[in-house]
Structure formats: C-alpha cells, structure tokens
Image: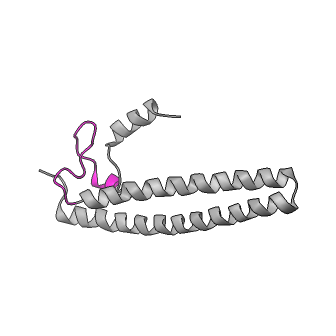
Amino acid sequence: MSHLTEQDRDAVRAALMARRAVVLDEIVAAERETGETQFAELLGRHNGDSSDEALAVTIGDLAAARLDLELGEFNRLETARLRLDAADFGQCGECGEDIPVARLIANPAAQRCIVCQAQFERTHAH
C-alpha cells in the first residue's frame, strides 16, 4: 500500500505539471538555439575565419547537449506522470523505502530515496 494520500498525489501532480511546462519551454528554446547556431555555423564557413567556425561548432554542440538534457528530463517527468497513480509510486526503486512527499514535490521524477540517490551518484559519477 502506498504512503501517499490523494492530497499528496495532487501536490506531486501539480509540481510535476508545473515542471513539465517549464521543461517544454526550455526544449523549445533549446531547439531554437540549436537551429540558430547551425545557421551561424553555415555563415562562418562562408564569411568567417576558422576561429569563427570553431566557435559556432562549439556553441552548436552545447545547444545540442542542452536539448538532450531537457529531453531526458521531459522523458523522466512523463514516466512519472504515467506512474503517478500506481500503488508503488513514491517508493525507492533501489531499497523499496518510501520517498518523502517533500522530495517528490521538489523532484516529481525522483526514483530513489535520498540515501540511495546519494549512493547512486557516488558510484555513477562521471
């Protein structure tokens, strides 16, 4: 049985939808930025020097990386949204303990309790 009340789920759902809207806006901005830097890269090839081209490529790479991060977060939020009403939503995927409601509101896509997340970050740091 879940430790989350209906009121808890509503609070998590509201936080999730608010974060989802922000991430969607960030995705649109990142896509626009990626397109603009690709255009700048083309201009650099015809009118600029090699340092202009290198800068355009670097900016394009950063924009693409930002877009990738935003899409990853959006996918995690969507997974959480689809699972929000599941009986095991809010349980740590590692140890099975309850994830505190405050953590789920702060990070609706959280899949681990704080202890397991800290351990994951120590062992998977790059």
Image quarter of residue 31: bottom right
Residue 83, how many percent across, how many down? 25, 57
Residue 85, how many percent across, how many down? 20, 60
Look at 18% across and 64% down and name the residue there: 6
Left or right of 15: which side holds 71? right
Is 39 in front, or is 122? 39
Look at 23% across and 52% down and name the residue there: 89
Image quarter of residue 40: bottom right
Left or right of 119: which side holds 84? left
Which residue, as the protein is rendered here, is positioned at the far front? 46
Main secondary structure found in the magenta portion: loop
Q: Residue 10, relative to residue 88: is it above or below?
A: below
Residue 120, how many percent across, how many down? 40, 35
Whether residue 82 is visible, yes or no, is yes
Left or right of 26: which side holds 101? left
Q: Is residue 103 magenta?
A: yes
Which residue, as the protein is rendered here, is positioned at the far left? 1
Q: Residue 116, relative to residue 45: is it above or below?
A: above
Is 47 in front, or is 71? 47
Q: Is residue 83 magenta?
A: no
Magenta part of the chain: 85-104
